[in-house]
Image (cartoon, rainbow, N blue to C red):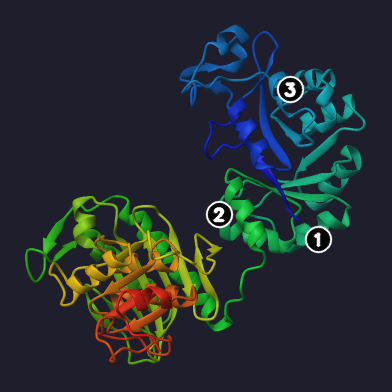
Amino acid sequence: MVEICAHRGESWTHLENTLPAVAAALEAGVATIEIDVRITADGVPIVLHDATTARIWGRPSAVRDQTMAQVAELRCGGDRIPRLSEVLDLVAGTGVRLLVDVPDPAIAQGAHAVVAAHPGRGQVAWCGDTLAMFVVRGLDADASIYLATEGVDEHDLRELVGRLRPDHLNSDGSELTPSDLRRCHDLGLAQSVWTIDDPAAMALLVDLGVDSITTNRIDLLAAVVAAGPPRAIPADLARARDVALDLAGFALRRSRAGARRVETKSGAADLVTDVDRAVETRVREILTSAFPTHRVVGEEAGVSGPDSAWSWHCDPVDGTTNFAAGLAFSSFSLCLVHEGRPVVGVVVDHGTGQVVDAVAGGGVRIDGLPVERPETPLSGGVVLTELHGNRWWPGLDRFYDACVAADATLRIMGSGTLSLTQVALGRAAACAISEFHAIDHGAALLACLEAGCRIRTAPLERGAARDVTGEAMPLGAPVVVGRSEALAALGGPTP
């Protein structure tokens, strides 16, 4: 199983390279903790990445020009820069490897002197500058060394391996290839990669068979490892999913600038922003280029492209009123439909930045991690719905009464796409939408189906409902999504 290496400690929720960050990484149960070392003017090795104390600590001076007493004065949110010896004290006896990253030979010599005198020296490994690694090897014939491979050709790498005798190769994880990994293992070495924070990249590297991954997101990497191999995505849909995810990333980045221009369409309560138009324009450009035989249907510009069994449906901003007002509950939605059936979908939560994607037969993921079948209780839980535009929809009073009777809390959030998606993620027990449209809801519907949710049409009209299976979308119909128990309690008939 791949080992997790905490980059500068638990640096996602703590200040990097501090004692609390190291302690949190130990508590998380990682195999290795990577730290950086610098040396003060009076020769004390400290745990710090930068050559100056400007970025985090607010003093724009080189570490080598400051004494330990001066460094000890610095504070950031109550944290301070620790000595290397303090980190060794914390890690000693835990069995966790401390990977000490040194940027030059002089620092390697000073840091090694502290390590060699410490009882925890057997837990220390070294990485960083290659010349610094030669210093370490010269001082300790048994030292554990991670050899950097960046910029090293095949001939030089084999020569360095012979001279330095490392136990790991340490590579940029974004550039590692299967042949690189085979070469590493053929040399009898373990492959470590840095610094990977994206779940899709993590899953790819785990599947590839790397031995250690350095990350700032140790919680995320642990979840990726625990999830195991991802469900296979049908080959004919894999490229469509990749393109949809790229567009989701663009939509998220563009949304973060906020709306600079807001206009009305059919009335004062029907808004459109410059972000709506810019995102949809980009989506059309990319999809038309990547899939010239597909039709594209958008919220703002309607239908383009040839008649086709394949069609893309895009709502660049669902919940535009929220978005224009600066409220966090809005989303981007893109869905590929084949012969009336949703087959690929992505939803971007503008507020959290999370990306949910689903593929027919391939499951649903959030930020690349598979979503387990949600078991969200109705009693004490949240039920979502949306207004019909800005109006109450017929039957909403009865739906509200049913929620009260079931001890559930009804919420109207302002984005039908995002509300439906919360059921797929197990955050809401159910969601009712007054009128289903592929542009707005297709991607969220697919996510709900792939998460194992039940979808019924005409939720409050007894005897008229039917199950939605994914073979055909319930265009124009009201729908309710949830477990069978929730649907029954909220008034929807079940077989």
Query: What residue type is disc 1 on?
Result: Arg
Query: What residue type is disc 3 on?
Result: Asp
Label at residue 202:
none
Q: Earlier in the sequence, mark 2 or mark 3?
A: 3
- In whole angstroms, how far apart are the C-alphas of marks 2 and 3? 32 Å
Which residue is under mark 1?
Answer: 182
The spot of residue 214 in percent (x, y) is 66, 45
Q: Secondary structure at mark 2?
A: loop
Which residue is under mark 2?
Answer: 198
The spot of residue 280 in percent (x, y) is 29, 69
Q: Earlier in the sequence, mark 3 or mark 1?
A: 3
Q: Is residue 464 left or right of residue 116?
A: left
158 or 23, nearer to the observer? 23
Q: Secondary structure at mark 1?
A: helix
Query: What residue type is disc 2 on?
Result: Asp
Which residue is under mark 3?
Answer: 89
**Image point (77%, 33%), residue name:** 94
